[in-house]
Image: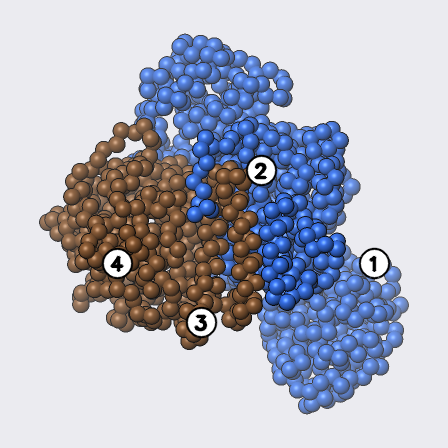
Amino acid sequence: MTPQSATSRTPLPRRSVLRSLGTGIGAVAIGLPFFEEMLGAKVASAAPNLAAKPTAEGGVPARAFNVFFGLGIPAPVQAEATKNGRLEGVLEPLAPLADKLAVLKNVDQVRCDDRGINAHFDGASGAFTAEPPDGDAKSGGPSIDQLIRNAAHPGGRTPDGVIPTLVAGTYFRRSRISRYVHSYRENGTVAAPMQESPGELFARVFGAQAGSDGSGVPMDPRRRRLTRSVLDAVQQQTKFLAGPRGPLGAASRERLADHLDRVREYERRTLAFEDEKAAKLAAGPAPPPESKLRHGADADPGGEGIDITLADLTGEWRLVADLYSHAILTDRVRFGSLTYLAAGERIRLTGDYEYDGRKIFTFDDKKQHGKSGSGGCSHEWWHKFREDKPNEALKAHAHLKMREVAYFLSQLAGEEAVEANGKTVLENALVTISTESGDGRHNDVKRELSGVFHAITGAGGRFRTGGVLDVGAEGIDVYNTLLAGMGVDRRLGPQNRQGRSIDALRT
Amino acid sequence: MFHASRTAFAAALILCGCAIASAGDSAVHSGAERRFLTEVAPVLAKRCLECHGPTSRQGGFDLSHRDRLAVGGTSGVAVVAGKANDSPLWQYVESDAMPPDGPPLSKAEKQILKRWIDAGAAWPEDEPWAVLHEADAAALGAGWVRRLTTPEYVASVKAALGVDLAADAARLLPRDLRADGFHNTAYNLSVDLAHVEAYAELARLAVQRADLPTVLKKQAPGKRLEDRIAALGTTVLRGPLSEEETKAFGTVADAVAEAGGDETEALGYVLEAMLQSPRFLYRLETQRGDGGTRPVEGYELAARLSYSLWGAPPDAELRAAAQQGELNGSPAGRTAVAEQVARMLDDPRARERSARFAHEWLNLDRLDALSPAKELFPDWNPALAADMRRETLAFFNHIAWPQSDGNDGGAGAPPLTELLTAGVAFLTPRLAEHYGLEWKGFENAVLIPSPEPAGVVALYDFSGEGDTVRDVAGPLSANPGEPLDLVISSDSKARRVAGGLKIDGPSQIASPQPAKQLTDALKATGEITIEAWVTPANARQDGPARIATLSGGSSVRNATLAQNGKKYDARLRTTVNTDRNGMPSTNTDDAVRDDRPTHLVFTRTKAGLARLWVDGSMEGNRNTEGSFDNWDDGFRFALAGEIGDARPWLGTLHRVVLYDRALTEPEVAERAASPWRVDLSDEPSRAGLLTQGSTLTVGGDEASTVTRGLFILRDLLLGDVNDPPPGVDTTPIPAEPGLSARAIAEKRLADASCGGCHVQFEPFSFAFERYDGLGSYREKDHHGNALRSEGTMRLPGAGGETRFESTNEFLALIASSEAVRRGLTRKLTQFALGRPLTAADEPAVQAIHDAGWADDAPYGRGSYRSLMSALATSDLMTTAPTEPAPPQPASDRSTR
């Protein structure tokens, strides 16, 4: 496969403009700088068996993304929303994409239960790994996106210009790291640090510092030459340390190899393509406006939650979703995860929620719970879930989550996402969608981790889409079936485990 | 989880007695004992202990201790040493009857238990409690190269180049995230593009700001460029360079030469490369070997010691010892290491490192984001969170480094268990008020000021004796010269007290000569700060009553800070729009408190902005035009009254500082938050860490008894519990009138499905029921429910229940427990190693524990120094596991 034939799309214009939904909900426009990746010709081939089928126009690379949303949809609510074989109720926002998705019912993640407080942590850690956690910031095994990455690209090394793994999200509680990061390496460590604000995400993807040495002043040619010499020396040393002749053990070599990749990436961004970019950068890339929402530790005031409006939450999320999807469409990223709310979702949401021209609900968690602090947060609706009650607020929150997940997915399904094989990126990629728990009541771990919502895309026709599948299987079997379908040899879980292929998933 | 049908195992245990082989008296573990620690204990912990632990004791059987295993269940032994097939424990495990719920033991786990019993069921005499509770951590152990944390990086750059990049690093580097209790957990210290970008920029800044000629003269001696690079590398990269490395850095120098640069510039670029080198950014050690353990010596050991004890790279002395081969495992080498450790523990960096430990152990970053509900806590002041953090750090320093603030009393350092009981606190007046403590009882309170920022021209701390108030600015002084000492006149009503100088009546405390040097310094900058910690005698004195004045009498002055009834007042003479008396003045609204000390600051910038700050808050301001050019350099400086004995001020002066510049708002806030050391030995409601806001806030706004109890269990006692069992609704139940949180908790404990686990931790929180979610003391909650402080608890590792009647009694009980001692040893060890401990570490951890808590420990039993000394000379520091070379070279990504 030549680089040209691997290019699957018409390159995007030099300066694209992202615009979050023009509905008045926090609409923000971002001018994107030009980057070499936007030329679209840097795409190196993936392992052939993992790429979508080649066509006369070319092929498409292997891609895998984990999309995570906080808390989840109780299994009975899922059942109610799929009882007619269509996506209704809380799943209504996914209906326009139904032909590109398979919604999986009865996925059991009980094996992810581990010693801890409750299934928030276990379920979140097990999403996309199907194994219990192994430390605050360490999963019990790799996530499926990373196994696909490793299979598609020897050693996990993606082509130059493609970020190996992109992890981003909008969420407002920190707690343990594996509650909100959803890409993990073979050794269980995070595959990439979380980019948790639009500014961070923009900088990670599009590199705010390109063309300068960080001082804000473009480097003069002499300084650039000498900086290249410095980086060459650093790379040479790192290369030795990361290599088999170096003094380090396996885990350390892998870390140093990562470091080397980042140095190379930094060099490319800072020094390479300088001539091409210099003039264009003079216009100045326009990063997204500084987020007015809380991030980092401020977003998690002792677990007591924060007040947030629907407009602010939606505006921020859509900016992140726009940036992330744009990174995919410009082939800046092929693997990673995106998180929309997580770790118990400690927010007190306010605002009128409308969908498709009709009012769904007025959020006012604090007032509706009649409590302040953590007791007034939206996650309490999950604790209060009762099958024989209307659960109106919970369903409205779940509906909102599905609307926002659908927003992201739809960015990969539009006209500009059509690839050389005539299908959209959403259809060609494997997008797995999951969440923390299948229930909200911490009174039965089995119930809480059973029936965890899952949905997948077709991955270039490998998996059935267009319906609701009652898989009735362990998450680990579902994930391993996906890996098999993607042509990945590696399997999750104990190596001597007798797995079960979920044939209903396969085309 | 083993809850539903565990009665079968319990019944089996009841039927049996137990005969366990003695482990002998030797402190050195036999091979069988080591196997127990590394193989058997993890299986017991993972699969058995939930139901048969020291507090759960299903069937009366406790598997957490050798002696209790020997006792067996209520009907006899479960293990017959040497005969697995006759041992009910094995029979039930082998048949998968145990555990009754959840997956059966794997074949490997079963074989471990069978081999153990058949071999005599050896169990070390010392209790492997910690192993039993951290067995799952094996995968988190050694093998991960350690990237420097941000504080370590900053310290390393400072040591190499003398440049402080703390602020830049905080701005540019991604934050290190906390995992498994600390921010330095190696497996979690990954690297992203943002790190590499930041390292490049920080290297550029460091070289740009360094005094390069001086640095190179010291760090890179020699005539040949290669020699200079090699010398530089040995210092900056913490060990000699290989020939290849020297060549690689040489190419950087060559490139500079080619570009027309000189040798200094060339070495500057070499330094940039070194600061981005993995050898600088990571703590690299040889990890390859035969799969066994190897000794750590020389430069590697030097780096281990320095980063463990200082959080900083080796200094010249340590490097020299490494270079001379003194740091090794020989008897002489051990002596040399011990001497280095003793020296290093005397260094201020050791104190800084211990503060970092306390900060991370207790997760004090959490306080930055504290945001309590306004409805519940309308009076919350965010500055209190910073006060709480300072309180805990100062308190930790007081216990860990008694000599630093006179706490040793000549009796050596106290054990760290005094962290739980010491009747001393470090409070700001506002924090004391928040806690509900009356300051009037703290007559002997001593101010512990944060370090003075730049610009000091005179400083009075009122130490010493006699009639002279010494200006102790000394080396701090921005205006070196004669100190501006003041003389207390013989008819003054002033006396020295523990916290300063108490003025009971009109007094003359003034410089005997004109304060010309001071006046000139202030005239030169056109700026001034007068800072004073004061406790006014009353809120009536006026005149205004002069607190500090640079003047010529009651109606002519350069500058004066004063009290006018309930307000504070500052007069400043300038060349424009003020009279000789400095009028109009800058003043506050009612701000005078006579019931506690106040931090009072007057600042004036060159641009003319004059401001009065009270306890860090700006309470008055005025735009003052002009300069100080019209100041009279014949005026004297006086405290507590005007020159000429008029306008007396009564009260206590605790500390007075003059600066030749205007302190900034953050500087004023920082200074205002300086704590006071307060004796609480007669205060029943406060003693030690667990009665400080920094730990009391872990329970959230509602002071969750569950969260507080779990914090004590997990972070102090290193115990653990499992998930809530099925069938129980764990949705928090709020307190309400007639139903306190304690009453709710007691119902939970009485519930068969909850109590089994909750009894292991929730009663710990009962001792703190009278502290609300933000640490204030009350005897009724906001629903009017009466609150209690007595209870009954079960300590991990101890059999049975223990009653406590008060908070202090509870604190004394746990402070005397082995569980707390072990918890402290293990936390310190984990932080020093930068990784969670594993079962394989246990023998070495035990040795550290034994040495650190020995009655004859060199720096006091259980003291910070003793424990760190034991740790620094332990096997965990002086040996390292190795990995055998893989059968085939691993995929070498670097060669692509």
Q: Residues within 10 Å of mark 4 (few under 14, many from 20)?
A: many
Q: Residues within 10 Å of mark 1 (few under 14, many from 20)?
A: few
User: In x, y percent, where is residue A341?
Assistant: 34, 55
Image mark 3: chain: A
Identify the secondary structure beneath mark 1.
loop
- Closer to the camera in the image, A199 or B460: A199
Q: Amino acid at mark 4?
A: Ser
Image mark 1: chain: B
* Quadrant of the frame with the N terminus of chain B: top left
Residue B286's disc is: 2
Give the chain ID for the brown colour: A
Give the chain ID for the blue colour: B
Q: Amino acid at mark 2?
A: Thr
Q: Are marks 4 and 1 in contact (CB under 8 Å)?
A: no
User: In x, y percent, where is residue A442?
Assistant: 32, 42
Q: Amino acid at mark 3?
A: Ala
Residue A278's disc is: 3
Q: Against B539, is A496 above or below?
A: above
Q: Against A240, is A331 above or below?
A: below
Instruction: Say which residue label 1 marks.
Output: B464
- Closer to the camera in the image, A415 or A275: A275
User: Residue at position x 42%, y 69% from top?
Assistant: A277
Q: Are marks 3 and 2 on the same chain?
A: no
Q: Amino acid at mark 1?
A: Gly
Which mark is first along the chain, 4 or 3? 4
- How far apart in space, not on screen, are marks 3 and 2 (Cα)? 43 Å
Q: Quadrant of residue B386?
A: bottom right
Image mark 2: chain: B
User: Residue at position x 66%, y 56% from top?
Assistant: B158
